[in-house]
Amino acid sequence: MIKKALSLFVIAAALLVTMPAKAQIKFGIRGGANLVNMKFTNATFDKSNRAGFYVGPTVKFTVPIVGLSVDASALYDEKTAEVDGQTMKAQSIDIPLNVRYGVGLSSVANVFLFAGPQFGFNIASDKKLYNSASEWTWRSSNVSVNVGVGCTVFNHIELKANYNIACTKSGEVSNNSSVSAKYNSWQLGMAYYF
């Protein structure tokens, strides 16, 4: 799974590096916090929102079209959820690929909107007993979509806020396909570009 995630990141970076010479490439580090909201197909679960975090390398490509850029990251992401009194933790490598459109004052500051897919690959997760015959497990991979807003200050510091919407199941109960969940999350983050 980790090899797939890193391969996708390397391929995306290699494709974007072949852009015209006027494109700018910046590397950095990104981190932030998640507020997870799980939605179950079976409403009998008692659940509550929980916090998590993410961190990892990022790259931003500014293309020769005014205001347009693309960013890609390889993030270690840890999410937790409280379900029926048990805390469940999912750990994954997430690869968000976002298209951005920004307006601003040259290198002093700009504000941008962004959206794009995110691919997640589970690397280690809790398995919890659901009942005597089955257990809760996180899926090995998932796909979601990011939609958000951000600002860049002095060409190096970036602040982002976004909503991550799950498109596939995040987890399920073994031997019972009718009990599954998706986790959506609010994310607040910061990046520093070198």
Image (cartoon, grey):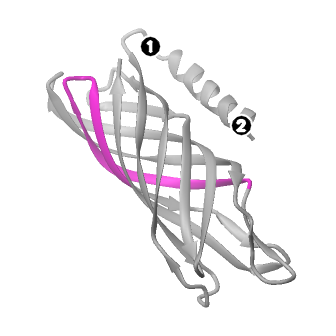
Compared to residue 148, the image places residue 88 above or below, namely below
Compared to residue 43, the image places residue 75 above or below, namely above
Foreground residue, 111 or 132? 132
Amino acid under label 2? Ile
Q: On the rendered image, what quadrant is the N terminus found in?
A: top right
Q: Identify the main secondary structure in magenta.
A: strand
Q: Secondary structure at mark 2?
A: helix
Question: From the viewer's perspective, is 64 left or right of 95?
Answer: left
Q: Residue 6 at what x, y percent from top left?
A: 66, 31
Amino acid under label 1? Pro
Question: From the viewer's perspective, is 39 left or right of 121?
Answer: left
At x 49%, y 64%, the residue is 184
At x 32%, y 26%, the residue is 65
Q: Residue 185 at what x, y percent from top left?
A: 45, 61
In the image, residue 153 lies in the stretch drawn in magenta: yes
Q: Give the residue at mark 2.
A: 2
Foreground residue, 115 or 94? 94
View extreme (bottom): residue: 44
Q: Which residues are magenta?
A: 140-162
Q: On the rendered image, what quadrant is the C terminus found in?
A: top left
Question: From the viewer's perspective, is 78 left or right of 104?
Answer: right
How many numbered discs? 2
Q: Residues within 10 Å of mark 2 (few under 14, many from 20)?
A: some
As drawn, the label of residue 20 is 1
Q: Residue 155 at what x, y percent from top left?
A: 24, 23
Question: From the viewer's perspective, is 146 left or right of 106?
Answer: right
Q: Going from the N terminus, do you reach mark 1 or mark 2 first? A: 2
In the image, residue 104 lies in the stretch drawn in magenta: no
Q: Residues within 10 Å of mark 1 (few under 14, many from 20)?
A: few
Query: What distance separates the C-alpha of mark 1 from that of mark 2?
Result: 30 Å
